[in-house]
Amino acid sequence: MTTTQTLLSDLYDTPEEQLIEQTHQLRDELGDSVLILGHHYQREEVFAFADVSGDSLKLSQQAADTDAPHIIFCGVHFMAETADILTANHQAVYLPDLAAGCSMADMADAVQVKQCWKELSTVINPDLCVTPVTYINSTAALKSFCGEHGGIVCTSSNAGKVLAWSWSKREKILFFPDQHLGENTALAMGVDESAMIIWDPEKPLGGNTAQAIEQARLILWKGFCSVHQLFKAEHAQTMRHNHAGIKILAHPECSREVCETADFVGSTEAIIQYVEAADAGSKFAIATELNLVNRLRIRNPEKPIWFLSPMVCMCSTMFRTDPQHLYATLLAIQQGNRSNQIIVPQEHKHWAKLSLERMLNLV
């Protein structure tokens, strides 16, 4: 066993109350030298230690604004990469569990996107007429690609603004890796579905004809969130049948069918604000990650809240960050060990930062 593995093994044998107490003590000793960022999908016992909590947009802004020398990102790999891109060279970003990834981010890689760009060039000139837009749930390499090709990053909070900006620059958009966020956002903006095509990276020309590419305004990458795709329109129908007056809230990573049946579609931050602003007694069924829904239920006891799906839809990679990994990361920082530091290669950092700054300047 490595030193880290031995430590984690010991921590899992430590009673939970003792571990939480030790974590608070260690956190207090480190003081302002450490900033802990916690995504809304984190488990409650980790989320409780966050100095700042939020969705991808809010945490990106915080990463760009902080002066803390050590930043622990309780989230997944692409989020820690984003923080490293936006922070100064003297700052270090850590991911408590290096295995915390994102299945959606894995659905588009730099090789595939570059091949897509090359294939598009056989039909159109993408450098003149296509703005590449990557959802923040993507690798630093894809953010770099967007920066270098006049493109931009978006989150579920600002996708509409980003699409509007992108169309103001060029007539077409290549949107990756999440098909549903791009489609739902464009439909809400009044874009006709006939102006959209799906790009399947496993097929020549993404499975499209040259004519379809020439006519499209929005090219949607075939990708999805493994959690949000589990929600179905029939789940909403069942909830409405069983609970009169209930409102359905959905994240835009859900399918078009789910979003069309919802009373409100918005990012995690927007869903939280919607619930908190509602009158006591308001009833909700929410289509997003389980930890967030459970937290909303606990914090709004006067408002009945249900998870939309009858099945458990939890982000297993977000769940990898547990109190043991958080404590181990804090201890490593105290000891001057940067084993869990996330470092984006310099070859990607410049262009990726440009694409992120374009997004942040729109907010």
Image (cartoon, rainbow, N blue to C red):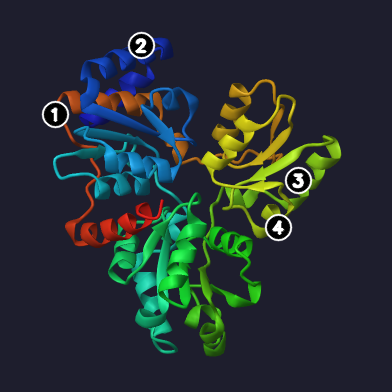
Q: Which residue is mark 3?
A: 236
Report the Cα–Cα distance between label 1 and label 2: 22 Å
Report the Cα–Cα distance between label 3 and label 4: 10 Å
- Which element carries disc 1, helix, strand or loop? loop
Q: Please state which of residues 266 and 134 is positioned toward the viewer in this rendering.
A: 266
Q: Three-letter amino acid code at disc 2? A: Glu
Q: Please state which of residues 37 and 169 is positioned toward the viewer in this rendering.
A: 169
Report the Cα–Cα distance between label 3 and label 1: 50 Å
**Of callouts 2 and 3, the N-terminal one:** 2
Mark 1 Cα within 10 Å, few/some/many (few <14, many 20+)?
few
Q: Which residue is mark 4?
A: 257
Report the Cα–Cα distance between label 2 and label 3: 42 Å
Q: Residue at x 52, y 89 (%)?
A: 210
Q: Residue 140 in the image: state x and y as whole percent.
A: 31, 56
The answer to which image quadrant residue 98 occupies is: top left
Q: Three-letter amino acid code at disc 4? A: Glu
- Which element carries disc 3, helix, strand or loop? helix
Q: Which residue is mark 2?
A: 21
Q: Please state which of residues 66 and 109 is positioned toward the viewer in this rendering.
A: 66
Q: Which residue is mark 1?
A: 336
- Which element carries disc 4, helix, strand or loop? helix
Q: Which mark lies nearer to you, 2 or 4?
A: 4
- In the image, 277: left or right of 90? right
**Of callouts 3 and 4, the N-terminal one:** 3
Report the Cα–Cα distance between label 2 and label 4: 46 Å
**Of callouts 3 and 1, the N-terminal one:** 3
**Of callouts 4 and 1, the N-terminal one:** 4
The answer to which image quadrant residue 75 occupies is: top left
